[in-house]
Image (cartoon, rainbow, N blue to C red):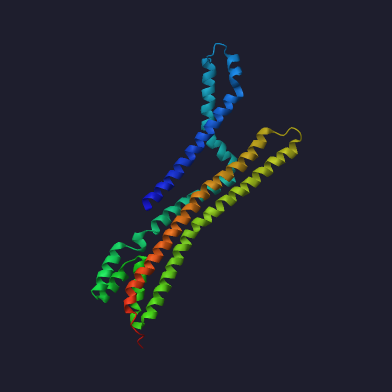
């Protein structure tokens, strides 16, 4: 599952900017062609061919447009929203990697512990089984070690101790992945705030310019509004999707840990409390 999930994340972060760039280039080419039109092109060059100088100028202008797109985006974001989105992006990537590395089977329900602990329990080597569980740093190891340590105090006490340890460790992991949801919810809110700021700037230009507002100033405000919305959603979508995937994986592992621990500690159900 880890391999496919990492592939999905990598595909999203690579495919989305490429598709966005391709869409912008396509729209730019379409706008240029529709603006000139076939009649304008034939009027400039009756023989149907384009002069070399005009072709070079067109190619140079298109190259400049492609090169300046990112510059235009960062200029529209400004010195406030730009650094904020960069920080959110870095934090988002760090949280995704950290949680993917933490919520793994080897860290929560390692197969070697299940096999070794089961063999020792089947052989009634309870002290050895306790040592194996105690020395294992996984969540299952901590739960089993806590349960076995309380078996002399009675089965009910052992079960309660396992539940307490499991809930405490689960809460820590849920808090850790919860920051991923926080970034996913915060990014579009920042984008919405940028949208409001950009639209206010555009309406201020209209109010100050009267009947002839500056198109360039209007475009700057609208660009801020649209770019902040786009970047906020770009950060939020993978963050929230991965949060749900990791949360479901954690729930599945916790359920598996509960089944395994109940299966082994349940063998001591006849043990009563010893004073």
Residue 87 seen in the figure: no
Quick one: 179 or 119, which is closer to the camera? 119
- Report the side of 158 relative to 72 (left or right): left
Residue found farthest to the bottom: 275
Quick one: 130 or 272, which is closer to the camera? 272
As drawn, 272 above or below 79:
below
| Residue at the image point whose x is 58% and y is 26% from the top | 32
Residue 132 position within the rendered picture, expressed as x and y whole percent measured from the top left: 28, 70
Residue 159 position within the rendered picture, expressed as x and y whole percent measured from the top left: 39, 76
Residue found farthest to the left: 123
Residue 6 position within the rendered picture, expressed as x and y whole percent measured from the top left: 40, 49
- Report the side of 258 relative to 230 (left or right): left
Rendered-image quadrant of the C terminus: bottom left
| Residue at the image point whose x is 35% and y is 63% from the top | 109
As drawn, 162 above or below 29:
below
Residue 60 position within the rendered picture, expressed as x and y whole percent measured from the top left: 52, 24
Residue found farthest to the top: 47
| Residue at the image point whose x is 36% and y is 50% from the top | 3
- Report the side of 231 relative to 220 (left or right): left
């Amino acid at each position: 599952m880890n391999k496919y999930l990492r592939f999905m994340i990598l595909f999203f972060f690579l495919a989305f900017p490429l598709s966005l760039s391709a869409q912008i280039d396509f729209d730019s080419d379409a706008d240029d062609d529709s603006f000139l039109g076939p009649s304008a092109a034939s009027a400039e060059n009756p023989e149907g061919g384009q002069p070399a100088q005009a072709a070079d100028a067109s190619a140079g202008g298109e190259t400049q447009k492609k090169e300046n797109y990112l510059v235009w985006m960062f200029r529209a974001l400004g010195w406030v929203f730009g650094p904020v989105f960069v920080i959110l992006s870095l934090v988002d990537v760090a949280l995704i990697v950290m949680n993917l590395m933490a919520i793994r089977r080897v860290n929560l329900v390692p197969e070697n512990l299940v096999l070794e602990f089961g063999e020792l329990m089947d052989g009634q080597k309870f002290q050895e089984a306790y040592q194996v569980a105690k020395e294992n740093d996984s969540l299952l190891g901590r739960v089993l070690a806590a349960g076995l340590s309380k078996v002399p105090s009675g089965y009910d006490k052992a079960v309660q101790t396992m539940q307490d340890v499991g809930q405490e460790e689960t809460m820590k992991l849920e808090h850790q992945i919860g920051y991923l949801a926080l970034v996913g919810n915060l990014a579009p809110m920042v984008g919405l705030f940028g949208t409001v700021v950009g639209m206010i700037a555009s309406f201020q230009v209209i109010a100050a310019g009267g009947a002839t507002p500056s198109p360039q100033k209007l475009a700057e405000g609208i660009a801020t509004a649209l770019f902040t919305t786009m970047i906020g959603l770009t950060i939020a979508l993978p963050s929230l999707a991965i949060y749900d995937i990791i949360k479901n994986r954690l729930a599945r592992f916790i359920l598996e840990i509960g089944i395994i621990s109940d299966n082994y500690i349940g063998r001591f159900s006849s043990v009563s409390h010893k004073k």
